[in-house]
Amino acid sequence: MPDNSLSSRNARMSKYLPLLLLPVWFLLYHNLQWLTDKLVKDVLGLTAGTHLTETLRFFIFEVPKVLMLLALIIFFVGIIRTYFSPERTRKALEGKSLFTGNVMAASLGIVTPFCSCSAIPLFLGFIESGIPLGVTFSFLIAAPMINEVAIVLLFGLFGWKTALIYVSTGLVIAIASGWVIGRLHLEKWVEPWVYELKAGAHPEDEKISFSARIKMGFEAVKEIVGKVWVYVMIGIAVGAGVHGYVPEDFMASFMGKSAWYSVPLSVLIGIPLYSNAAGIIPVVSALIEKGAALGTALAFMMSVIGLSLPEMIILRKVLKLPLIFTFIGVVGTGIIIVGFLFNYIF
Amino acid sequence: MEIKILGTGCSNCKNLEKATREAVAELKLDATVVKEEDIVKIMSYGIMRTPALVLDEKVLFYGRVPSVSEIKEMLSKK
């Protein structure tokens, strides 16, 4: 039908609209420093070098930078994630030996779409299909701790090296903790009904076209950025305040290397403290600038992001309390070791 | 027809129930919409991600909240 062709072509074009925004993104991102300087100097007319100017400059530059990086990465991760699903991950993990299973579960935990509200069906689905408890835990540790929001913020505010350190140590912790929990044979501390559960046959996967995947990537950007932008703003505002007003080396005495107890203390404080990566990483970045040791800061971040109280409460439905405490203990010990290690190396 | 929304009460599950009710009303379907919150029953459908929509005991989709118009399209196909 000829009269329909134009509108259908428009519909097709609009499907790829997110891709057309990419050049705009690059142009804006590369001129951000220039735009910030222009705004601070010419529009706001502030004198360079004062506390207020530097605090404002930091905020005006970092907020759009981090939000733009987030949007870009979440878009691509969102597309990649459409190729993964908990169902496929489960299939990949079935029948794997303990150590191999832990490595695969932790790695797949990074890319498999995961939301803590689905932690229970996911846990049940894994256990029901015979995946060992320890392997399941490797997944449950890696999935929330190593996420794209944390990686983008670490990359944007610390550089790629710190981002890489975070991801690799996070993986090691998830693999090792899951392995330890597996060796301890704690099945007796799983609620008994879990092992009696009979799950139905898995329904067929929906077929997804490539344009639908692009749309899902774009939806992920809207959903995640829409949720975390407030935390990014607050986190960077606090960070900017610290950056501009707190004296150099202020943090050194209580979060520096010489204070050995600061690592376990940071982990303990981090467990009940519930914040997402978007809120905590900008603050930690400013603390490091003022003399906090990298290992201590890393341990604090991992504890805040990886060990969260709400998730423990959700998991209480399927796990008895001793297992939850063992879980916190094993992962917490892993984080403390990483913290000491990095304070020792750097 | 009988529509079930599977979900343990997270915000997305409520969003899906709302969207589905809207779709059913707009299509003027003769359908009942019930919410299934019992995790054991939810697992019997073989899914690992909530929320999910079940039409006459068959899972239509899971792990996402489609728009009202997409739900309408899927329901009217059946």
Image (cartoon, rainbow, N blue to C red):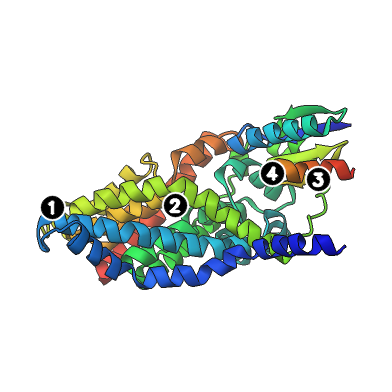
Dot 3 crowding, Cα within 10 Å, few <14, some 14–19, many 20+: few
Tell me the mark number nearer the camera, choosing from 3 and 2: 3
Check disc 2 and report its element: helix, strand or loop.
Answer: helix
Mark 3 lies on residue: B73
Dot 2 crowding, Cα within 10 Å, few <14, some 14–19, many 20+: many
Establish if B12 lies above or below B32.
below
Q: Nearer the viewer, residue B58 or A342?
A: B58
Question: Are the two marked residues, 3 and 1, in contact with CB atoms closer than 8 angstroms?
Answer: no
Mark 1 lies on residue: A245
Mark 4 lies on residue: B67
Question: Are the two marked residues, 4 and 1, in contact with CB atoms closer than 8 angstroms?
Answer: no
In the shown orientation, is residue A102 left or right of residue B68? Answer: left
Say which amino acid is labelled 1.
Tyr
Q: CA distance from mark 4 to mark 1?
A: 47 Å
In the rendered image, the quadrant that contains the C terminus of chain A is bottom left
Q: CA distance from mark 1 to mark 2?
A: 35 Å
